[in-house]
Amino acid sequence: MNTPYYLLHKELLDEGIEKLNQARKQYWPNSIVGYSFKTNSLPWVVSYMKKQGYYAEVVSEDEYHLAEYLGYDQIIYNGPVKGQESFLRACRAGQIVNLDAEREIRWLEEAAVDGKPINVGVRVNFDLESMCPGEASGGEEGGRFGFSYETGAFAEVLERLGKIRGVKVTGIHLHCSSKTRSLNIYKAIAEMACRIRREYQLELSYVDAGGGYFGGLASKPQYADYLREMSEILKREFDPEHTILIVEPGTSLICPPIDYVTSVTDIKQTNRNYFVVTDGSRIHVDPLMAKKSYFYHLECQDETRPTAERQVISGFTCMENDRLFELKGYSALQEGDRIIYEKVGAYTMCLAPLFIGYYPPVYLEDQGKISCIREKWGVKEYTSQSVVEGNE
Ligand SMILES: Cc1ncc(COP(=O)(O)O)c(C=O)c1O
């Protein structure tokens, strides 16, 4: 197999799914998993999640269409920029739709909804940073999703929706992105859900706690820890028999099982540096160029080679900052050696640009057998929707 490529280990994926399902069974059996499409929407991955009985958690009209195209009939429609047509269709079809924009309320009002019952959820914007100082992704600037609990915007939405014939608020959505993925975040989410239920006397058929969990790291909280902490708090206000707990994992499920396999193509000694050039790139494992370190292992053809003091592992693109990590005091790598990045399944394939090289192939490893689940993109795929001047 020519490098670079992604390699999905099915056993590791199944391990995560099993742990999640066990935790649900133990702490909140009446639960739904919405797999977060945005985290990695490779068609094989999302169709495998469907096979597990998971819902599609989508945040755009394109993702909604992808879920439909791949045969999902259970969809959670989130996000502040839903399409009007898919929004109304989802509402009418009884999908789980969490409102996140004023225009969605207007669409419901305008559709006059002919009295037919429509259940919706509302995304809550709350001040996570004050409940978990230093942990919220938005920091001091706060998060921008949902309707603010503190300003009264959330209460206004409830009031407005209450006036639309047939429309009922049956759920709340409290996903929060955090810097820490700590248990505190989920305790705060559960506390907030309880507060809202009490304060507005809502009869909720679901509480959607969103995603953002750790997965695949023994030293970090596990699904069982997150669900135990949330269930303890939620039980104060919600009867687990009657209220569904929704979780929307992405990273925790799909980050751990995917590797990115690259090869050394060249060595460059300059007066200032010692570069190891590879056919992989940071754009495939860290498209936002934000990571400080990577999980990786090396496969060297000859480990008896002399040690190099410092080797700067670099990518194939012509960006100077396409440098991945430094290897200190290790045998000098040579052409053909492999560098395999691990746990790179989240926010990588779906965010990687078509810069210089097109998408690498993706292989599935299942009990030692390898199969291709996405062919490498070439010029055919790249040009498929484009006009080529001069070609009729
Ligand atoms: C609404 C919602 N649900 C789920 C997720 C998945 O989060 P993660 O991939 O961290 O599990 C996100 C990610 O931002 C999200 O915005």
Image (tube, rainbow, N blue to C red):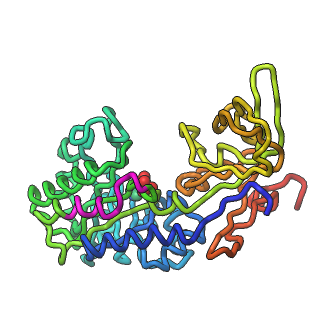
Q: Percent x, y for residue 122?
A: 27, 59
Q: Nearer the viewer, residue 244 or 110?
A: 244
Q: Is residue 182 left or right of residue 362?
A: left
* Residue 81 showing in the rendered view: no
**Quadrant of the image occupied by residue 134:** top left
Q: Is residue 251 left or right of residue 44?
A: left
Q: Is residue 47 left or right of residue 250?
A: right
Q: Nearer the viewer, residue 85 or 131?
A: 131
Q: Percent x, y for residue 373?
A: 67, 70
Helix, strand or loop for the magenta stretch, by majority: helix
* Residue found 34% across the figure and 62% down from its top: 223
Q: Nearer the viewer, residue 209 or 324?
A: 324
Quarter of the figure with the C terminus: bottom right
User: Up-down: is 76 above or below 264?
Assistant: below
Q: Percent x, y for residue 317?
A: 75, 40
- The quarter of the image that holds ligand 1 is bottom left
Quarter of the figure with the N terminus: bottom right
Residue 220 magenta-highlighted: yes
Task: Report how many numbered discs are placed on residues in the image.
Answer: 0
What residue occupies the far top of the structure in this picture?
A: 271
Residue 369 magenta-highlighted: no
Q: Percent x, y for residue 107?
A: 35, 61
| Residues drawn in magenta | 218-231
Q: Nearer the viewer, residue 252 or 354?
A: 252
* Residue 349 showing in the rendered view: yes
* Residue found 31% across the figure and 50% down from its top: 146
What residue occupies the far front of the structure in this picture?
A: 304
